[in-house]
């Protein structure tokens, strides 16, 4: 999953430490999310979206393909 | 304001200030909590070993040998869990990876110990292996917390 977090951060003139303190996470977490090594939880993604006042799908792109979903939705 | 240019700190050289900075950087509250509780656990193990070696058999010896290591281990595991709960989601994931890695290493070490024993090598108690595995987990966890300071 790719994200535009570094660009948004640069736009606001924040360091990774600044963003980490605003989100109440460690700087390592921000770094991992930015570099794509870690996919944030829903609550963290919502917090990031609320902080930048943008929809989540605008910040995080590259969804998992629906074809990979193997659950049987027709099961009763 | 550069604090090294004022008062007594002005007399300290840069290397000393850097050393102090590194110390404060490492001894954050999570690492201090883990280290102190681990030290307590090791002291508890030492007390149990000394008591079982030098005390006369009796109820006091049995109580000390059983309860002291168990209670200190309980304290240590509790403190480790507290540090885990106080971490954010990415650090929790990394701590869990550390636990999984230490568990796999411990499992392989147990199998290797069993095979070596069957081949005639001296018997190594499983408690020693467990202590080594737990120590490996603690070192890895301290490394994760240290990197996240």
Image (cartoon, coloured by chain):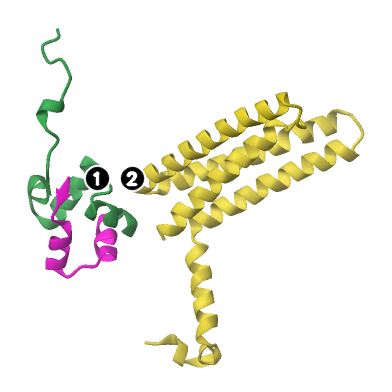
Chain colours: A green, B yellow
Residue contact at pointers 2 and 1, CB within 8 angstroms: yes
Our reading of the magenta stretch's main secondary structure is: helix
- At horizontal 15% and vertical 67% (from top left) the residue drawn is A10
> Which secondary structure lies at badge 2?
helix
What segment carries the magenta color? A1-23
The residues tagged by marks 2 and 1 sit, at their Cα atoms, a distance apart of 8 Å
Q: Say which residue appears at 25% left-offset and 51% top-offset.
A: A33
Is residue A3 highlighted in magenta? Answer: yes
Quadrant (top left/top right/bottom left/bottom right) for the N terminus of chain B: bottom left
Q: Answer left or right for B5 relative to A26.
A: right
Q: Which mark is residue A40?
A: 1
The quadrant in which residue B2 appears is: bottom left
Q: Chain of mark 1?
A: A
- Protein chain holding label 2: B
- Circle number at residue B12: none
Q: Is B117 included in the stretch rendered in magenta?
A: no
Please provide percent x and percent y for residue B143: 48, 54
Residue B33 point in image, percent of width and height: 55, 53
Marks 2 and 1 on same chain: no
Which residue occupies the extreme front position in the image? Answer: B119
Which residue is at a point 24% across and 61% down the rendered structure image? A19
| Rendering coords of residue B5 (x, y %) | 45, 92
């Amino acid at each position: 999953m790719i994200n535009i977090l570094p660009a948004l951060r640069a736009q606001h003139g924040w360091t990774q430490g600044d963003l980490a303190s605003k989100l109440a996470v460690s700087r390592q977490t921000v770094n991992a999310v930015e570099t794509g090594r870690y996919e944030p939880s829903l609550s963290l993604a919502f917090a990031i979206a609320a902080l930048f006042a943008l929809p989540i799908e605008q910040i995080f792109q590259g969804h998992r393909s629906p074809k990979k979903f193997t659950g049987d939705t027709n099961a009763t | 304001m550069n604090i090294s240019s004022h008062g007594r700190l002005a007399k300290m050289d840069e290397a000393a200030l850097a050393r102090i900075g590194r110390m404060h950087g490492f001894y954050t509250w999570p690492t201090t909590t883990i280290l102190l509780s681990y030290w307590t656990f090791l002291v508890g193990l030492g007390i149990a070993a000394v008591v079982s070696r030098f005390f006369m058999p009796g109820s006091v010896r049995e109580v000390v040998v059983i309860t002291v290591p168990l209670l200190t281990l309980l304290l240590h595991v509790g403190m480790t869990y507290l540090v885990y709960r106080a971490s954010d989601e990415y650090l929790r994931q990394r701590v869990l990876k550390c636990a999984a890695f230490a568990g796999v290493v411990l499992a392989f070490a147990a199998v290797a110990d069993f095979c070596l024993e069957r081949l005639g090598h001296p018997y190594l108690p499983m408690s020693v292996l467990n202590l080594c595995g737990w120590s490996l987990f603690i070192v890895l966890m301290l490394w994760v917390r240290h990197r996240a300071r």
